Amino acid sequence: MIETIQWTDGGVVMIDQTLLPGKEEYFTCRDYKDVAHAIRTMVIRGAPAIGVAAAMGVAIGIAQARPADLDGQLAVISAELAGTRPTAVNLFWAIDRMNRVYREHRHLAYEALRDRLIAEAKLVREEDIEINTAIGRHGAPLVPDGKTVLTHCNAGALATAGYGTALGVIRAAIESGKNIDVFADETRPFLQGSRLTVWELQQDGIKVKLITDNMAGHFLHSGQIGCVIVGADRIAANGDVANKIGTYSVAVLAKENNVPFYVAAPISTLDMTFPTGELIPIEERGAKEVTHVFGVPVAPAGTEVRNPAFDVTPNRYVTAIITERGVARATFEKSLRALVEETK
Ligand code: MRU
């Protein structure tokens, strides 16, 4: 299995996703500022992986803090990490979880508190892998046998601590004996589909073909695609889904062609504080991601650009949301609420 992120004695080690597939190199974060830098520059990306990184960022920050003013430093560390990327709610979920554990153990001696936070960050990583395996288990029966699965962006092992959400469902379907292959949208402008999804599926020997984003409609109309499966960065209480830019277009095309559109995501991606997806903050990234490809200009110098990194797919296009606790279908307000409240 690809090791996306690990806690080591030398720091938080991540596979550098900006260099894949050309180079398989690892980036070591030696302090919390390195972790924040890695999230901001997309050395690590994908909602659940960002969450694990943020948890480890808090832990390494406290492990290196002055014991005299821990509360103040935790606030600084948390604010720096929270300011890295706005859309994936797992970032804020992980920071909140670490802050809660800190408060619950604040009475301990510094060394014990530090060790507790490191243990929690490692647990966030381990749990993520278990959660993805459960998502796969729930999702595998939904995947039509003998057909192609279309996916967008990278919601795989690289976007999580391991196994993946959308790609986890694909892995589980194959493990259950289904004969499927994958079409990966290239996912302009950052190319997570071509650089990351194709690479990680090839590592596992899963049959994959790369298509450009504007080919999705053609293939969805062809009858070859059995279902679409994507991940999510934030899901509102009504089932509206924020995911990588271009997801909305694929969802509309899927509905037009009667192809099921599935979203695979952990419960930590549900944001029940947003009744609908309208107010989900959408990250706007730099112009160069659009005007250049690997440093080569593909537009005239000075071209003005819009570069929203995510879009929101209204719930009417979503056939089902696959979580580690089960599959939610419309009416999502009810079905998602039931899944969230399951442990309470
Ligand atoms: O900008 P990115 O690469 O962090 O965006 C990632 C996505 O949109 C993924 O599809 C999403 O986070 C789901 S990952 C399991």
Image (tube, rainbow, N blue to C red):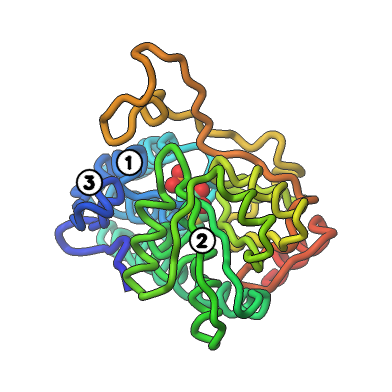
For marks 3 and 1 on the same chain, the one whose residue lies earlier in the sequence: 3
* Alpha carbon separation for disc pair 2 and 3: 38 Å
Which residue lies under the disc numbered 1?
36
Q: Which residue extends farthest bottom?
A: 177
Residue under the point 57% across and 60% down: 150
Instruction: Give the structural element (helix, strand or loop) at label 1.
Output: helix
At horizontal 74% and vertical 45% (from top left) the residue drawn is 314
| Residue 291 location, quadrant | top left
Q: Nearer the viewer, mark 3 or mark 1?
A: 1
Would you say 116 lies left or right of 340 here?
left
Label of residue 183 in the image: 2
Asked if disc 1 is less than 8 Å from ligand 1, the answer is no
Please give the residue where the numbered disc 3 appears in the rendered image: 31
Q: Which of the pair 118/28 is nearer the observer?
A: 28
| Mark 2 crowd level (few <14, some 14–19, many ≥20, 10 Å Cα) | many
Question: Quick check: marks 3 and 1 in contact, CB under 8 Å?
Answer: no
